[in-house]
Amino acid sequence: VYEDGTDHTADVNADGYAIKANVTGVNANDYDLQEIKDGKLTINQAHLHVTAANKSTTYGDVVGLTGTVAGYVNGDSSANVNANVSYTTDGLIASKNDGVYDQTNHVQAGGYVINASVSSIGGEKGGNYVVDNTEGSKDITNGVLTINKRVLTGTVDNTTTTYGQITELTGSGLSNIAKQDEGKAGVSYTTVGYIDVNDNHVYEDGPDYTED
């Protein structure tokens, strides 16, 4: 703001500008003003602040990583400042499409950091802003992705047999298996009511379970 009370905060972009000295109150013919050197006004870029949103999902499900950008000044907004923000995490592995990860590979249930970074800032007023992506920067607030365990369901069939006779232990199998584990997960059925003389589980070829 100048002495005349005019607000110039929105007039110029981040850059360097000459500061001129205007001498008043004396007769310019009596003074040599060549030794009055110009100064320089440096307007630094304003810092944007990016915050990655915390997310929660279930192992095997899709989750979108998002966040917010703040720090606009002088009436600027995402309409004239285009920050190219990306959100990544080690908690999700596989294809990426517009920030959405499809968990098609094994990912452990647990908590993972969501990292935010800005690759470029464009737009009409984009040159007036900057984001420091270095680790520990105040411009970045990382989030947390929580991957909860997936609940498996299944039913073990009731079985009746006669003492000394063989019977097979069966069930309905497993359901709600994550896509990345389809064809890998299996289930076996055991009981202390049988002694497996082969030291193994039930076989389709009919092992000897007569030692009850």
Image (cartoon, rainbow, N blue to C red):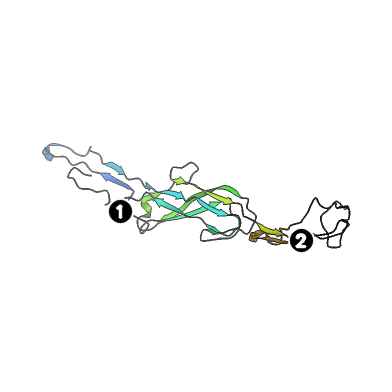
Name the residue beneath numbered marker 1: 75
The local secondary structure at tag 2 comes to: loop
Give the side of residue 181 with respect to residue 133, left or right: right
Gap in angstroms between the C-alphas marked 2 and 1: 68 Å
Asked which secondary structure carries label 1, the reply is loop
Task: Establish if 29 lies above or below 178.
Answer: above
212, 18: nearer the viewer:
212
Name the amino acid type tagged 2.
Thr
Mark 2 and 1 residues: CB-CB less than 8 Å, in contact?
no
Q: Which of marks 2 and 1 is nearer the N terminus?
A: 1
The quarter of the rendered structure image containing the N terminus is top left
Q: Residue at (83%, 62%) from the top-left corner?
A: 204
Is residue 159 found left or right of 24 in the rendered image?
right
Pinpoint residue 175: horizontal percent, then vertical percent. Answer: 66, 61
Tell me if mark 1 has few (under 14), some (14-19) or many (20+) residues whose alpha carbon lies within 10 angstroms of its own.
Answer: few
Q: In which quarter of the image is residue 124?
A: bottom left
Tell which of 3 and 31 is nearer to you. Answer: 3
Give the label, 2 or 1, closer to the camera: 2
- Mark on residue 53? none
Residue at screen point 54% across, 50% down: 145
The residue sitting at 86% across, 56% down in the picture is 163
Q: Which of 157 and 48 is in front in this view?
A: 157
Tell me residue 194's x, y (percent).
83, 53
**How many dots with numbers?**
2
Q: Residues within 10 Å of mark 2 (few under 14, many from 20)?
A: some
Of residue 50 and residue 181, the one placed in the foreground of this image is 181
Q: Which mark, by number, is residue 170?
A: 2
